[in-house]
Amino acid sequence: MSAGIVVRGLRKVRTLLADSGGARGLAGKELVRTRELLHECAAGVGGEISARQRAGRLAETYLRLDDEGRATFLRTLATEFGPDPQLVATAHAGYQAAIGSDAQWMAESELRKAMRSSRLRILAQFNTLPQGVKFLVDLRADLLRFADTDAALRSLDRELESRLGAWFDVGFLELQRITWSSPAALLEKLIEYEAVHEIRSWSDLKNRLDSDRRCYAFFHPRMPMEPLIFVEVALTDHLADNVQMLLDEQAPVFDAQRASTAIFYSISNTQPGLRGVSFGNFLLKRVVDDLKRDYPRLVSFATLSPLPTFRRWAEKNPEAWQQAFSAADLERITRHLKADMVPPVDASELPKLLADDRWVNEARLARALQHGLMRLAARYLVTASKGGRPVDPVARFHLGNGARVERLNYLADTSAHGRQQSYGLMVNYLYDPDTIEANVEAFSRGGEIAVATAIRRSARD
């Protein structure tokens, strides 16, 4: 069985499963044969061709399995091919006895060897397949799902995460600009993987790739048509404050040569199996360098970002509403709800009121809610933390990369998704080259976040 036959076989299996859903479990003779193949992989039986054939058969078997079968496969790999406890104990005793002597370094090497599991040898053989890297990335996506309820899989997950971290080191990745002239298969991937603002049509995608827009992605040489992470950029002359206007297909195309500001309005990680493998910060730095080279007039680099967990946090913290909405705010809100409502609506009632998204379209009521919601969002960004870091995942990402919370934008995303996650609010994170390094240091050392004075003041009011 040649490598070409193996990869064609894997493609055929993926296609058949996609078309028919014909997955099955793993038991009986097939489980016995799978164990035999795994043991042969662990022992390194035969030469390189035999190893590829075995890896190909195991991959094909795995792709045909249903969730229960895949969990059985992974549990077998995790529990039967780990380090030998007796060998580890013996090597550890030898190391302890050798500390301080000339034999210490040899004993350390023996301990390291004993700790190395045969799982890694098996996983490395999948990597030799033409589609092996993608196979392993997808396998880890399954592993992450199953490990939540099966502790026996967590050691295997840590090993695979470590191996993927080495294979996907940023030094091996390629930055590419994606344009309307890129292969259709790749453009389809953008539509599929967009995780922030849904791409609704081909015309929507074409608008996002117009002359005043840029899209960049990181690729791995072994996954040339699979973007690992991509960022969408708008070239403008101002700090954007509304994503619907930014994505308006009917808006005139801006002259990119006049642009002073680059707005990163969508960053999408595409491979769940690469969770924990970080390269988003390197992507932004590379993109900034590329943009500055092509557009020397650019002086500002900022985001228009969602607040994905703001509404969830607000609904779980009723005391925050009491702090954010003043008596005057509540009186104005009451006046635009029902003229004869006495006394004024209580702040504790606001989450229920806002559950009906129609308030967004009632201009006077929306204005009455603005000051309180902006203060609530400021408190969320500045004070809501978990483990000494912001609870908001997008804030953690940008602040950890040296950005500053620059401005909150009211009703900046009035889509159903925007209302659902953040009452329509969005935030600009500003990347100021003069302060990035200092911000990174302060954040990593003590969790200190860089925040514009107006937002910090609003959070304390």
Image (cartoon, rainbow, N blue to C red):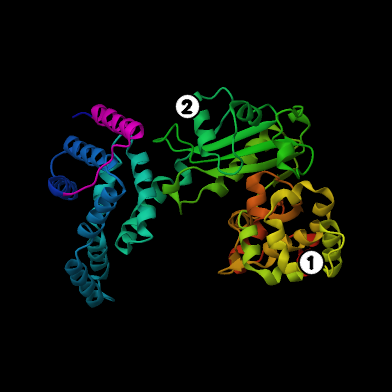
Q: Which numbered tag is attached to residue 345? A: 1
| x then y, percent, for residue 128 | 28, 38
In the image, is 134 to the left or to the right of 210?
Answer: left
Residue 397 visible at all: yes
Q: Amino acid at mark 2?
A: Ala
- Residue at 26% across / 59% down in the picture? 116
Q: Is residue 24 magenta?
A: yes
Tell me if mark 2 has few (under 14), some (14-19) or many (20+) residues whose alpha carbon lies within 10 angstroms of its own. Answer: few
Q: Which numbered tag is attached to residue 185? A: 2
Q: Which residues are magenta?
A: 3-27
For the residues labelled 1 and 2, say whether their Cβ atoms are less than 8 Å apart: no
Q: Quadrant of residue 130?
A: top left
Tell me if mark 1 has few (under 14), some (14-19) or many (20+) residues whose alpha carbon lies within 10 angstroms of its own. Answer: many
Q: Which one is in front, 455 or 436?
A: 455
In the image, is 24 to the left or to the right of 454?
Answer: left
Tell me which numbered mark, 1 or 2, is placed earlier along the sequence.
Answer: 2
Using the numbered discs, state the Cα–Cα distance from disc 1 to disc 2 in whole angstroms.
Answer: 53 Å
